[in-house]
Image: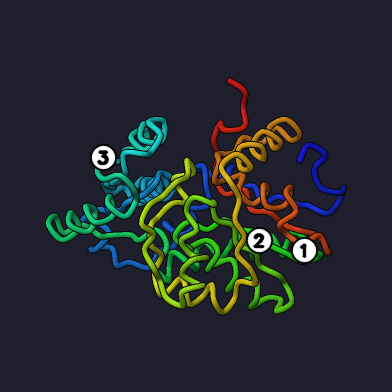
């Protein structure tokens, strides 16, 4: 991994530089724009491993309405603090995202809040798809786009947009070895729930995706590959040492797949660096 890809073979879509620290602001704001004002005024609620929560907090800030974010207990404290800095109310609950999401849905029903799903919402998926629109507009020579998979919102939007523009663009999804939710679901032919999660990349670690996302991935994503936590960590270190790009584990997943040779090298590859963090920095 130390040598890196051949010159000119890899381009990066630096979503880690988004105002909210990840691509999630795209989907959250797009969802916000599809809602009637009276519904938005009640306030927004969601569940997140951190990044989608930041997107919803930012959307709430843009609209001037309150946002509540339910986080699982495996969320880094720094993400919770950052959410509060954007004015969000943070509620910790559950071991993983799925648990926190059940609490968020209960709160939406109980308090009359507008729930924003992180990946199984057509408006959110469309917003995430603008990542591919921009990448292909900036560099028409891209032959493969690589995006990480948590619940599947980003890869769904990227694949739909990329294939609509250029049917021959290859789309590769990347999951952690310890949370192969979508790959196992594809093998099973239905959305299955993993018995357990074993990865520190908590934003890529729901136990279950949805039939909506799985159907899009099945039809439009060419392959799904797996990377280990250590490979993601090494990729984050490479990004920081070579390029000064600060990425979290999940943000470096796509680069890990490229550097370990799990993504084909024919043509130019665009790796989406999906989220900012300090996992690549020496402490």
Q: Quadrant of the C terminus?
A: top right
Disc 1/disc 3 C-alpha distance (Å): 41 Å
User: Residue at 30% of width from left, 53% of height from top?
Assistant: 46
Disc 3/disc 2 C-alpha distance (Å): 35 Å
Among numbered discs 1 and 3, the one appearing first in the sequence: 3
In the rendered structure, the answer to whether residue 171 lies left or right of residue 176 reads right
Among numbered discs 3 and 2, the one appearing first in the sequence: 3
**Above-or-below relation of 146 to 62:** below
Q: Element under label 1?
A: strand
Between tags 3 and 2, which lies in front? 3
**Above-or-below relation of 102 to 240:** below
Residue beneath label 3, please?
92
Out of 140 and 4, give the one closest to the viewer. Answer: 4
Disc 2/disc 1 C-alpha distance (Å): 12 Å
Q: Residues within 10 Å of mark 3 (few under 14, many from 20)?
A: some
Q: Position of residue 176 (x, y in %)?
A: 54, 51
Residue beneath label 1, please?
142
Residue beneath label 2, please?
134
Among numbered discs 2 and 1, the one appearing first in the sequence: 2
User: Residue at 86% of width from left, 49% of height from top?
Assistant: 6
Q: Image quadrant of residue 132?
A: bottom right
Q: Position of residue 49 (x, y in %)?
A: 39, 46
Between tags 1 and 3, which lies in front? 3
Out of 185 and 106, give the one closest to the viewer. Answer: 185
Between tags 2 and 1, which lies in front? 1
Q: Position of residue 7 (x, y in %)?
A: 87, 47
Q: Element under label 3?
A: strand
In the rendered structure, the answer to whether residue 241 lies left or right of residue 188 reads right
Q: Quadrant of the N terminus?
A: top right
In the rendered structure, the answer to whether residue 188 lies left or right of residue 220 reads left
Q: Position of residue 20 (x, y in %)?
A: 48, 43
């Amino acid at each position: 991994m130390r040598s890196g890809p051949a010159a000119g073979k890899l381009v990066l879509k630096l979503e880690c530089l988004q105002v909210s620290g990840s691509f999630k602001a795209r989907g959250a704001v797009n969802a916000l724009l599809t809602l009637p004002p009276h519904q938005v005024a009640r306030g927004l609620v969601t569940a997140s491993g951190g990044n989608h929560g930041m997107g919803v907090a930012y959307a709430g800030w843009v609209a001037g309405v309150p946002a509540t974010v339910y986080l699982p207990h495996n969320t880094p404290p720094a993400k919770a603090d950052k959410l509060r800095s954007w004015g969000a109310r943070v509620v910790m609950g559950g071991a993983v995202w799925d648990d926190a999401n059940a609490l968020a849905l209960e709160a939406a029903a109980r308090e009359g809040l507008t729930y924003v799903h992180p990946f199984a919402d057509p408006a959110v998926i469309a917003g995430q798809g603008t990542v591919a629109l921009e990448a292909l507009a900036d560099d028409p020579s891209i032959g493969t786009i690589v995006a990480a998979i948590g619940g599947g919102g980003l890869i769904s939007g990227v694949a739909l947009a990329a294939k609509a523009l250029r049917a021959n663009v290859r789309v590769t999804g990347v999951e952690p070895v310890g949370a192969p939710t979508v790959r196992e679901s594809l093998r099973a032919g239905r959305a299955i729930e993993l018995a357990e999660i074993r990865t520190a990349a908590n934003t890529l670690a729901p136990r279950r995706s949805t039939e909506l996302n799985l159907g899009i991935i099945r039809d439009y994503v060419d392959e799904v590959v797996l990377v280990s936590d250590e490979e993601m960590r090494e990729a984050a270190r490479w990004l920081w040492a070579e390029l000064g790009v600060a990425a979290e584990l999940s943000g470096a997943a796509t680069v890990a797949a490229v550097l370990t040779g799990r993504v084909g090298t024919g043509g130019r590859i665009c790796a989406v660096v999906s989220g900012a963090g300090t996992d690549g920095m020496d402490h």
